[in-house]
Image (spheres, rainbow, N blue to C red):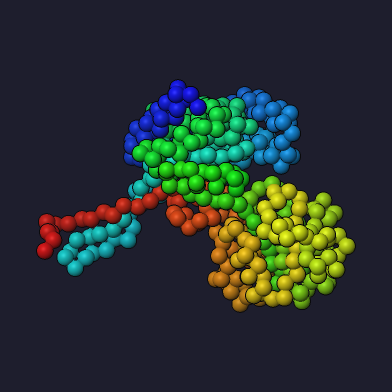
Amino acid sequence: MSEIEAGLIRNMAIKAKRAAEPLAATPSAVKNNVLLSVVDLLEKNKERIQRENSKDLEVARAKGLSSAMIDRLELTDDVIKSMITGLREVVALPDPVGEVFDMARRPNDMTVGRMRIPLGVIGMIYESRPNVTIDAAALCLKTGNAIILRGGSEAINSNIVLSEVLQEALAENNINADAVQVIPTIDREAINELLSQDDLIDLIIPRGGEGLIRFVAENSKVPVLKHYKGVCHIYVDKDADLAKATPIIINSKTQRPGVCNALEGLLVDKTVAESYLPEISNHLAKAGVELLGCGEAVRLSKSISLAKDDDWGTEFLDLKLCIKVVESFSEAKEYILEHGSQHTEVILTENYSTAQQFIREIDASGVFVNVSTRFNDGGQLGLGTEIGISTTKLHAYGPMGLRELTTSKFIVYGEGQVRE
């Protein structure tokens, strides 16, 4: 990276830090007006946005990017509608900033409590999906955080035009436009430069493939919130309602196979495998899913090929699925512990006690009963949208919405007390 570009990143971080301080004290009504201005500007500028997005799509196709990557990159009418819906939902949610909680009186009559505050300046590094630019900015603005966004090179035109929309909305509401900035270069060294700004940036959130996340975690001087991969499983328990199970499994695998909450491993209890595995494998094969399985799964269904050792625990992000017949709940739990990524784990069962055991004992950011893995998503869980899904436990676990983009400080009210 040239000295000019390195200086650019440093200058952006300085400006973000300056913008963050007044933004932290901005009233909720003003922040909501900014987001509503973004809604209006997205609607007014839709053709312009899609024109810039088409430039990225043209380059992506010329480079031979996969259909799943193209799907994540394209700003269709439906995707833009979804962005607008997400913005309106964030507006409707309560603002956590300034919330006072855990107030208690100490023996010396001091009143001690906590107040929720913004994190400060967030740097976000992400791939492919330009709608993340709007989602992340919306959450940060609502919580009083400034944000520097570094999207993938494949979405550079889309991200720049979306940043212009965001900054126009800020300016319309007399908010420093530096509160949202998109790094305008595709030079990969810009990432290293961003990761070195530990005196100005409070948190880095990488969102993308496992390689990107590991690179950021290994090279950042700034604290990193990690989400390595989404190896999601469904366990079909011996007490599952199999009629209910089939559409859940199909939806989990095929609705959008290229996303992190898509199904990658199916575990079927041996008690129901003989009758159910031929049926579900037939449905999946008809949907175009390549099926890989253990020896018992192969014996039970002609649609399943023998899996290789390195297939187990793989995030395919494609129409490919591993299937294993398990002896019991305990074996399913052991398999998830070994091959899961602490993203999403689902049990299909009508047995309340088994469901509760699964909820208690399975360690993942989302543990579900009788629903699709695809519901581990900020919008679906009532957060409006999300800035990412954390699969590590500090400082958040699971989809990160408004509350997860804040921290708290202690506040104390006294009447002249001194420490003895």
Left or right: where 62 falls relative to 200: right
Residue 349 is situated, as x and y percent measured from the top left of the image, at: 68, 71
Residue positioned 63% across, 32% down in the render: 154
In the image, what residue occupies the spot 70% across and 60% down?
312
Residue 399 is situated, as x and y percent measured from the top left of the image, at: 53, 52
Q: Is residue 125 visible?
A: yes
Q: Nearer the viewer, residue 208 or 142?
A: 208
Picture residue at 74% right of the left edge, 34% below the top: 64
- 166 vs 248, left or right, is left
Q: Residue furthest right?
A: 302
Residue in the picture at 48% in, 36% down: 192
In the image, 209 versus 273, the foreground residue is 209
Residue 278 seen in this snapshot: no
Where's residue 419, x and y in %? 13, 61
Q: Nearer the viewer, residue 254 or 230?
A: 230
Q: Farthest residue in the top direction?
A: 4
Q: Is residue 12 above or below residue 79?
A: above
